[in-house]
């Protein structure tokens, strides 16, 4: 079964980016290597939050839902699972 991820990246100043992927490890690596223009510009490389689903349409709907939220609500979502804003992908790479 294929997995799809909705994720939020953050910069050190807590600027946020919401995205979707079917390979979270690869996508986070791409963001860190600067292959995404927007996230590279604002240095958004820390994985602050992610959730997983087996349905691509559910993932797309969830991404759109989160993108439509006010910043305050996105922060509340992150802080429910990551109150310290740690990089959830910190140990994934060398």
Image: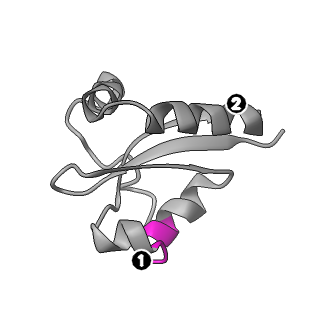
Q: Residue under circle 1?
A: 34
Question: Which x, y percent locates residue 21?
Answer: 63, 52
In the rendered image, the residue lying farthest to the left is 13
Mark 2 surroundings within 10 Å by alpha-carbon count, few (fewer than 14), some (14 through 19), many (20 or more): some
In magenta, the rendered stretch is 29-36
Give the total of numbered labels: 2
Residue drawn where x is 43% and y is 77% of the image: 33
* Quadrant where the C terminus is found in the figure: bottom left
Above or below, 36 against 67 in this view is below
Q: In the depicted view, which residue is nearer to us: 86 or 49? A: 49
Q: Secondary structure at mark 1?
A: loop
Question: Which x, y percent locates residue 84?
Answer: 19, 36
Above or below, 81 against 47 in this view is above
Q: In the depicted view, which residue is nearer to us: 19 or 53? A: 19
Q: In the depicted view, which residue is nearer to us: 92 or 86? A: 86
* Quadrant where the N terminus is found in the figure: top right
**Which disc is residue 58 wearing?**
2
Say if residue 94 shows up in the picture.
no
Decide whether residue 31 is among the magenta residues. yes
* Marks 1/2: CA–CA distance: 28 Å
Question: Which x, y percent locates residue 13?
Answer: 15, 54
Going from N to C along the chain, the mark reached first, 1 or 2, is 1
């Amino acid at each position: 079964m294929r997995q799809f991820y909705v994720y939020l990246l953050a910069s050190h100043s807590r600027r946020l980016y919401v995205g979707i992927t079917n390979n979270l490890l690869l996508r986070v690596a791409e963001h860190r290597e600067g292959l995404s223009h927007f996230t590279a510009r604002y240095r958004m490389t820390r994985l602050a939050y992610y959730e997983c689903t087996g349905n691509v349409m559910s993932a797309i709907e969830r991404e759109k839902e989160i993108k439509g939220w006010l910043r305050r609500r996105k922060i509340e979502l992150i802080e429910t699972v990551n109150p310290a804003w740690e990089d959830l992908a910190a140990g994934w790479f060398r």
